[in-house]
Amino acid sequence: MIGALGVFLYGMKIMSEGIQKVAGEKLRSILGAMTKNRVMGVLTGFFITSIIQSSSATTVMVVSFVNAGLLTLGQSIGVIMGANIGTTITAWLISFLGFKFSISAIALPLIGICFPLFFSKKDFHKSIAETLTGFGLLFIGLDFLKNSVPDLKSNPEMLEALGNLTDFGFGSVLIFVLIGTLLTIVVQSSSAAMALTLVMCHNGWIGFEHGAAIVLGENIGTTITANLAAIMGNKLAKRAAVSHSLFNIIGVAWMLIIFYPFTEIIANFIKNSTGESPYLTSAAIPYSLSIFHTSFNILNTFFLVWFVNTIEKIVNKIIPSDPSEKNRFHLEYIGTGIMSTPELSLLEAKKEILKYSTIVKKMFNFIPSFLVEVDPQKSKEVFDRIEKYENITDKIEEEVATFLTKISESELSERSSKSVRSMLRIISNLEKIGDLNYSMALNIQKKNEHKAWFTPSQRDNMKAMFDLLNLAFDNMVANLNKETTDIDINIAIELEKQVNELRNKIRDEHFVSIEKGEYNIKSGLYYNNMYTNCERIGDHIMNVNEALTGINLD
């Protein structure tokens, strides 16, 4: 069973990795388009789950996308709602065909057909082969998994005892909800659990109502997989997994309140349509449960899709942000979930680097206030904060570089390999900006200790330089948040030019002032260090923009 589960998970990983390689840089825009509103999110979840016949696989992928910052929590909730509807397709296949369609029958030939594509010179063809091979392995693993569990059909006595639990009224309904939850957790597939439920009802071990109760339990049990996948993810991933559980639990709760009237309505509909009552004829139960399963998930989605924001707020309270972590070093997007793949990891790293750039910019903005602060205690507090950020920027550079190095060990497309090199260059320059920020803070501290005060003209010049660098920082951060093709490098070039021109102007004025003896030579030394370091920061900002657009990369 463990080996079968390994094949299943490996197939899922390979398929996901192949899909991401096929999509490439367009993955984020595709996901954004598919989930731009709640209805589209629901349809996306329904479509994906209907194809791969596993709401668990869909939600695990959604959790990974949230972990990488590709989807917001609100968008993920819509996809999860759609996945719950998509998983009801299995029950209809069983009802109409009398058995679950085994896609594993074509999985092995599919792998054989794709095998030659692995030798193609085109990365796209290799990615297609990887996707379809992963798809085949996933269902081969699922078939192995199904065959490795005890054969319930050949050993009916294993579940026949369940018939003894049907005489406790509404208590029996609650018992079977629990059984459905546990059954789905054990087989790790709500689709497989649904098939077993239909077998039990068909054999007459349990009635329609108790089968419906098991179906409700399956909706809770299927959330376990996503929660397991989120254990190693960040808080955003955990919130997405919890929202899945919350959505299904709320649905089961309100359905239990109207359980008997609702099942009665379905039974009457089946009786009027086919002439057979699911309460009296076991042959009518599969269709009845299929209708119950589908109508419950559609109604639950219809009712709760309007409360996505409310669910999001509740989940944020269940898993709150730790206030103590606000200024504490931690990687927010880089995770180690079971669905982590090289292509998805690059997107996680891109999000982390964007956050890194905002931290470096924030650190830089402590410098102007530190320069003009006259209160010794407040001055010390600002310096301590800058020193703390210096340690943070060093650690982030080290962690992200290590992460990118691990990614580069995997098989990447040429475009992805180029992205890794670009990101390594970016974080190196961001770390150097952090070092220059700290160097300026030390310079100001020594200046204050020696009481080497700046003249009004010097302070005005430094303010102009700080303002100009802030524009350059804003442009850099904006570019980090764009696709490469959307970046206008000319804006960065113009800002860099203005920084150099301002530095030259300040330097020329500075040398003239020194010759005239207008201020202390020691003060002039600290002043020279300040505007020189500012110009160097401008150079590193330009290096980041060049790395983003591929200039001088090779």
Image (spheres, rainbow, N blue to C red):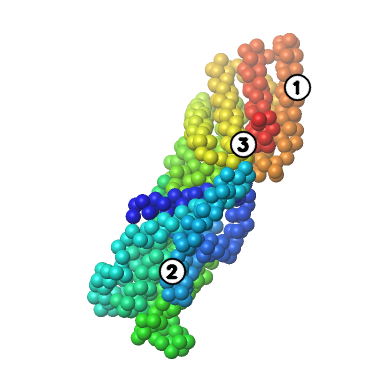
Which residue was labeled with disc 2?
100
> Percent from the top left, x then y, of residue 17?
52, 48
- Name the amino acid, label 2: Lys
Query: Where is residue 484, by image quadrant?
Result: top right
Residue at 39% x, 79% y is 285
| Quadrant of the rendering where the C terminus is positioned | top right
| Quadrant of the rendering where the N terminus is positioned | bottom left
Residues at circles 2 and 3 in contact by the CB criterion of under 8 Å? no
For the residues labelled 3 and 1, the Cα–Cα distance comes to 38 Å
> Percent from the top left, x then y, of residue 459?
67, 25
Residue at 39% x, 81% y is 283
Residue at 27% x, 71% y is 156
Look at the image and tell me whether residue 114 can be seen: yes
For the residues labelled 2 and 3, the Cα–Cα distance comes to 45 Å
Which residue was labeled with disc 1?
505
- Name the amino acid, label 1: Lys
Residue at 25% x, 71% y is 157
Q: Residues within 10 Å of mark 3 (few under 14, many from 20)?
A: some
> On screen, 523 above or below 259?
above
> On screen, 295 above or below 421?
below
Circle nearer the viewer, 2 or 3: 2
Give left or right: position of 298 versus 485: left
Query: Where is residue 226, by image quadrant?
Result: bottom left
User: Which residue is more in the foreground, 83 or 144?
Assistant: 144
Which residue was labeled with disc 3?
418
Give left or right: position of 72 versus 146: right
Residues at circles 2 and 1 in contact by the CB criterion of under 8 Å? no
For the residues labelled 2 and 1, the Cα–Cα distance comes to 78 Å
Mark before the other along the chain sequence, 2 or 1: 2
Number of on-image labels:
3
What label does residue 298 carry, if any? none
